[in-house]
Amino acid sequence: MRKCWRRITGLFLALALLPGTGILSAAAEPLQECHKVKSSYSDTKAQNKSVVRLWQVDTALEEVTEEINGIAAGWADELGGSLPDAENTGDGNSRLDVEIRYSRTGLNWMSFLVQARTIYHRELTDQRIETRTYDMTTGLRITLDLVFDEPDAWIFLGNRVRETLRGYWPDAEPDEAVLEKLCEPSALAGADFTLHGMSLVLHYPASLLYEGKNTLMEVTFFYPEIRKWMTEKALAETDNLSYYKTVALTFDDGPKNPRSPAVLDALMEKGVRATFFCIGNLVEKGFFVVQREHDNGHAVASHNWNHYATRGQSAKALKAMPEKVNKVMNQVIGIPVRYDRAPGGIFPPMQKAKVEWAYIQWSLDTYDWRGRTPNQVLSSVKKKIADGDIILCHDIKEYAPNSTRKIVDYLQEQGYMFLTVDELFAKDGVELEIGQVYYRCADGVTTKKPGGT
């Protein structure tokens, strides 16, 4: 019924948007003034050659800006002075990155996650997080008891937290006593959380449950599965399909340093999450990049074990790939990947070999792999973009960071909200199935877009 109403509403508003009407579609809201954020960082190098990178934000509300920046600056002061000596001038030898992630939902609410990541020789040695969610028109801080008003919600959340956190680090056992405390209603009500385009996410440092692990663990709840327990205000502020069109931004061929981290910086500046399709045999060397992708809230997926043409590999080699990829992913981020994109999009040999992955294609190719400039990439997006699209980009390309900025700026003003691949399909209740191929998700339609990409 709701999707039918959206189609009817969309038809009416499409007519209303004829030149001269001055009416903007309710399903294509541009970036709200209260959601606009400027984000940037500065680097400070100490005498011992350690580096502190401090991110700061400028939001629509002075009190929010001061609180978020104060948390970040406080951690930079507290932790930055105790960094060990760097053994050489490499930027990964001894550093503290105090990052500020932000995300929007609805017309008024925003979430911020401040994270301090201490790194020595690429190894993540410590991580701290703190979250805030606000109504950006009033400054009211939103807590989880303002999101949920039904007791059954806490039971559902607790069960999911228990199940998800036990699934991290498959070769290790969590601290069960601590885990049970995290699942209690009082602990859930005070848990660190953020709200996104189509999900509420609870965040936990892995060190809480797994000794020696310092990445983050995330427990995701897609809005359709939790709306029945939400307050009236939360329902309105998570009903993003009534306000925005949706799109998933995806990147292939990484991890590659320093280009992949530069794309991550661009996404952090813009408050957007993306999906990274990583080549398995690059993950061990680029583990620190993949860890940051995961810890920054992006979806991490497979781009096969290597970038060889699938048509030239044996069925045995193809079928063995999920185990190889997930072995290294479990070591690096603690969880396996759920889906794959075959190099060049050539998935038929993998289907024939019965490789146990779902296959994510794309519905809009930016052709950035040809070396296109940011303006050329943006031109492709402008010509072909449609609601529910999956956009293909490559984070190893020179122009990828600036292309990302241009794509985000343009599409947000055109009424698009960026989702991860998981969110894009969850919004319409589409469950990804092993062996199936998906090109987009527009009102549940996942096939190729008419006219191709």
Image (cartoon, grey):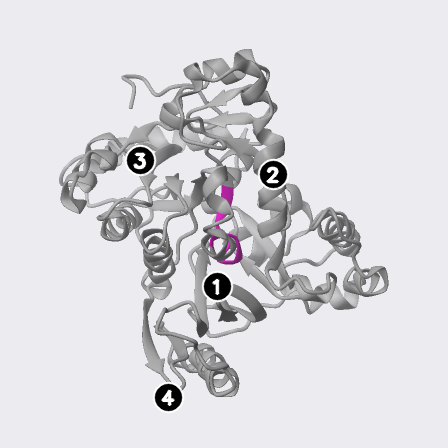
Viewer can see residue 333: no
Which residue corresponds to mark 3? 13
Between circles 3 and 4, the one closer to the viewer is 4
Q: Residue at x 52, y 33 (%)?
A: 425
Say which label, 2 or 1, has the lower sequence index.
1
Amino acid found under the numbered disc labelled 4: Gln
Quadrant assignment, res 18: top left
Q: Which residues are magenta?
A: 293-300
CA neighbours of label 1 inside 10 A, class few (<14), some (14 to 19), many (20+)? some
Task: Indicate yes or no whether the magenta region holds residue 294.
Answer: yes
Spatial CA span between label 3 and label 2: 46 Å
Say which label, 3 or 1, has the lower sequence index.
3
Viewer can see residue 278: yes
Amino acid found under the numbered disc labelled 3: Leu
Which residue occupies the foreground of this view, 448 or 243?
Answer: 448
CA neighbours of label 4 inside 10 A, class few (<14), some (14 to 19), many (20+)? few
Determine whether label 3 and label 2 are within 8 Å by CB. no
Q: Is residue 224 left or right of residue 139?
A: right
Spatial CA span between label 1 and label 4: 20 Å
Between circles 4 and 2, the one closer to the viewer is 4
Q: Position of residue 89 (x, y in %)?
A: 35, 73
Q: Is residue 395 left or right of residue 6?
A: left
Say which label, 1 or 4, has the lower sequence index.
4
Does residue 414 lie above or below 116 as drawn? above
Say which label, 3 or 4, has the lower sequence index.
3
Which residue occupies the foreground of this view, 384 or 366?
Answer: 366
> Which circle marks residue 122 in the picture?
1
Does residue 366 lie above or below 133 as drawn? above
Amino acid found under the numbered disc labelled 1: Arg
Which residue corresponds to mark 4? 47
Q: Position of residue 387 (x, y in %)?
A: 36, 33
Quadrant (top left, top right, bottom left, bottom right) of the C terminus: top left
